[in-house]
Amino acid sequence: VYDEKKILGLAIERQGPSMIALAPKNYIIFKNYCDDSKIKLKGVNQKTNKITKDQIVDCINEGKITKCTNMRLGQKNHQMSQLSIEKNGITGIHTKMIVLENQSCCPFMYGLTAMDYSFN
């Protein structure tokens, strides 16, 4: 697995029998048929932001955006301060792939639309 080449920057991170994915690096994967799950959200500190499966499902069904707050330390004029940054933790916006009508994804390439791809 470690020697696999990444085609257009895509690779397998985790595997399981069931998965809900909003975008690359934004997904919930179920390990034992819903008994245990792993949530992955790029750029979100999950220790301070409690993200649940229901919030991901609400994003899909209702388009609901979940805001998250990340805390970090910053220095300005030799003085340390704690910064709070609010960002969209869960959103349905997807800019790296094109979602086809059969719900499969193809890489985004400038000038191509979903109509330019074909599938069987």
Image: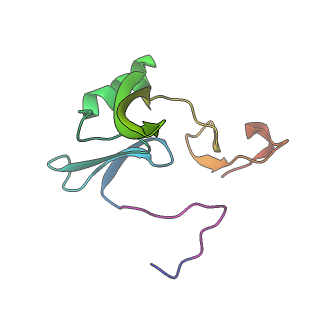
Confirm whether the magenta stretch covers residue 76.
no
Question: For the view shown, which residue lies furthest in the bottom direction?
Answer: 3
**What residue is at 23 percent from the left and 56 percent from the top?**
31
| Along the viewing direction, whichever of 120 and 13 lies nearer the viewer | 13
Image point 47% across, 28% down: which residue? 91
List the single residue furthest toward the right: 111
Tell me residue 42's x, y (percent): 44, 45
Q: Residue 40's x, y, as percent?
A: 36, 47
Instruction: From the image, give the main secondary structure of the stretch colored magenta.
Output: loop
Q: Quadrant of residue 98?
A: top right
Q: Is residue 118 above or below residue 3?
A: above
Instruction: Please indicate whether residue 96 sits to the left or right of residue 28 in the image.
Output: right
Q: Position of residue 62 (x, y in %)?
A: 42, 17
> Residue drawn 57% across and 60% down?
10
Q: Is residue 6 left or right of residue 14?
A: right
Residue 99 at least partly seen = no
Q: In the shown orientation, is residue 23 left or right of residue 35?
A: right
Give how far across and how far down residue 28 sits, in percent.
33, 44
Indicate whether 101 appears above or below 17: above
Q: How many marks?
A: 0
In depth, the one of 8 and 89 nearer the eye is 89
Direction from residue 19 to residue 24 in the image, left or right: right
Magenta includes 9?
A: yes
Residue 63 visible here: yes
Quarter of the image where the N terminus is located: bottom left
33 up-or-down from 56: above or below: below
Q: In this rendering, is residue 76 above or below 117?
A: above
Magenta stretch bounds? 5-14
